[in-house]
Image (tube, rainbow, N blue to C red):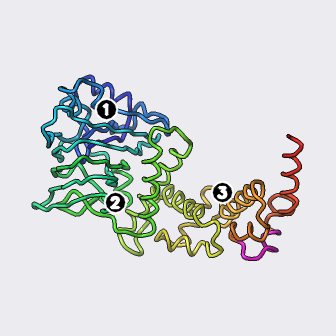
């Protein structure tokens, strides 16, 4: 349906010029990423929208197939002349993009000649996509199918119902660093990503972005960075246990590790060993990526726990022992010491000071 990897200004210019580069798995459009880098990339969190409703009914299908594409949107699959299609997208400074695509039933073709600088992780939110690729192989994607990795530079055709799809568009160079040159198995264009803890977290990120479309909040940029990190770590683990982690994946490994910590602030079992096992890397690799940023994993977790403690203590009247459990401390006395080390006072004194300052303000 779309292929967003890039720049709104560039996409607009190519659209006006009638260029036919950069289309997506289901036939819709994607702003294109220059081989030399991203040009005119909008700020993360600023959504851009293109819609067939920009033109009169009779010309909507032709308008959409004339947008910057990397394959050919062949024909609609119903007889209505009011073809409806739209996509919303946001792009990070490094070219990673998220797009939400809604399009009427159509048939499209992909393969050589398209933009080969991107590889996409797709999630069907509603509707059905039938893909024919490889040696006459057929895949069916729907809302229950989970995540799939699409290489639109490989030959394939798609037939869709009215469909809503979320795409995370990644740099091919980053994907190759993670998984190797064969982004998908030889002879096919699509591969499913097996269910697991990390894939469930990535789905949650994409669902969050799906619901954030049109809302410019700090969440959008953070969720896009987290989704990219999780996706690359998931792909790296397709190589199997004990694989080499190239330095190009350090940022992804760090981002995915920080995400694990943020999800597990309340779990006292959160350790370097546990996080390394979750991400499929070694403890030494985690020590290295945190050390390169002047941090330790334990120090990062401690700071997250103290931030939560300060927030909870300032906003509700839970007993300090209950707050300690929410922050991953099973023993209140250990929590008390950790809090005093960070803030110079006990949790009870912190709360009393917040209450007093609030009363003085009113």
The secondary structure type at the circle numbered 2 is strand
Q: Along the line of sight, which residue is nearer the eye, 149 or 93?
A: 149
Q: Along the line of sight, which residue is nearer the eye, 118 or 285?
A: 118
Answer with mark 2 or mark 1, whichever residue precedes in sequence: 1
Name above or below for residue 191 compared with residue 222. below
Q: Along the line of sight, which residue is nearer the eye, 165 or 337?
A: 165
* 128 relative to 208 in the view: left or right: left
Residue 237 appears in the figure: yes
In the rendered image, which quarter is residue 237 located in?
Answer: bottom left
Name above or below for residue 239 compared with residue 13. below
Number of marks drawn: 3
Q: Marks 3 and 2: CB-CB under 8 Å? A: no
Nearest to viewer (mark 1 / mark 3) = 1
Magenta-tinted stretch? 329-336
* 21 relative to 12 in the view: left or right: left
Q: Which residue corresponds to mark 2?
A: 147
* 256 relative to 307 in the view: left or right: left
* 208 relative to 136 in the view: left or right: right
Q: Which residue corresponds to mark 3?
A: 294
Q: Marks 2 and 1: CB-CB under 8 Å? A: no
Q: Residue at x 38, y 57 (%)?
A: 177
Q: Residue at x 34, y 60 (%)?
A: 147
The secondary structure type at the circle numbered 1 is strand
Gap in angstroms between the C-alphas marked 1 and 3: 46 Å
Label drawn at residue 51: 1
User: Looking at the picture, how far across and down is residue 266, in whole percent?
Assistant: 65, 68
Q: Residue at x 31, y 32 (%)?
A: 51
Label drawn at residue 275: none
């Amino acid at each position: 349906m779309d292929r967003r990897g890039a720049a709104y200004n560039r996409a607009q210019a190519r659209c006006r010029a009638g260029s036919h580069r950069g289309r997506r798995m289901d036939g819709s459009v994607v702003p294109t990423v220059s081989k030399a880098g991203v040009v005119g990339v909008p700020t993360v969190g600023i959504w851009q929208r293109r819609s067939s409703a920009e033109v009169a009914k009779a010309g909507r299908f032709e308008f959409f197939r004339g947008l910057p594409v990397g394959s050919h949107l062949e024909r609609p699959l119903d007889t209505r002349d009011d073809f409806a299609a739209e996509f919303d997208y946001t792009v990070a400074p490094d070219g990673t993009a998220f797009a939400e695509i809604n399009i009427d039933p159509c048939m499209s073709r992909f393969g050589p000649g398209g933009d080969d600088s991107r590889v996409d992780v797709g999630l069907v939110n509603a509707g059905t996509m039938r893909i024919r690729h490889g040696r006459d192989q057929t895949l069916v994607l729907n809302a229950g199918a989970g995540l799939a990795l699409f290489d639109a530079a490989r030959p394939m055709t798609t037939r869709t119902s009215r469909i809503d799809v979320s795409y995370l568009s990644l740099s091919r160079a980053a994907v190759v660093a993670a998984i190797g040159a064969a982004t998908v198995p030889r002879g096919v264009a699509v591969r499913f990503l097996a269910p697991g803890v990390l894939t469930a977290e990535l789905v949650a990120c994409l669902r969050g972005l799906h619901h954030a479309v049109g809302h410019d909040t700090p969440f959008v940029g953070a969720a896009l960075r987290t989704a990219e990190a999780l996706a690359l770590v998931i792909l790296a683990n397709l190589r199997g246990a004990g694989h080499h982690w190239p330095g190009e994946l350090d940022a992804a490994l760090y981002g995915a590790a920080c995400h694990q910590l943020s999800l597990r602030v309340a779990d006292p079992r959160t350790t370097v060993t546990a996080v390394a096992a979750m991400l499929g890397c070694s403890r030494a690799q985690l020590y290295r990526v945190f050390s390169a940023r002047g941090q330790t994993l334990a120090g990062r977790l401690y700071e997250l726990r103290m931030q939560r403690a300060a927030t909870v203590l300032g906003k509700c009247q839970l007993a300090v022992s209950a707050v300690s459990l929410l922050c991953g401390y099973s023993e209140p006395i250990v929590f008390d010491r950790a809090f005093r080390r960070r803030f110079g006072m006990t949790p009870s004194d912190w709360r009393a000071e917040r209450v007093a300052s609030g009363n003085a303000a009113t």
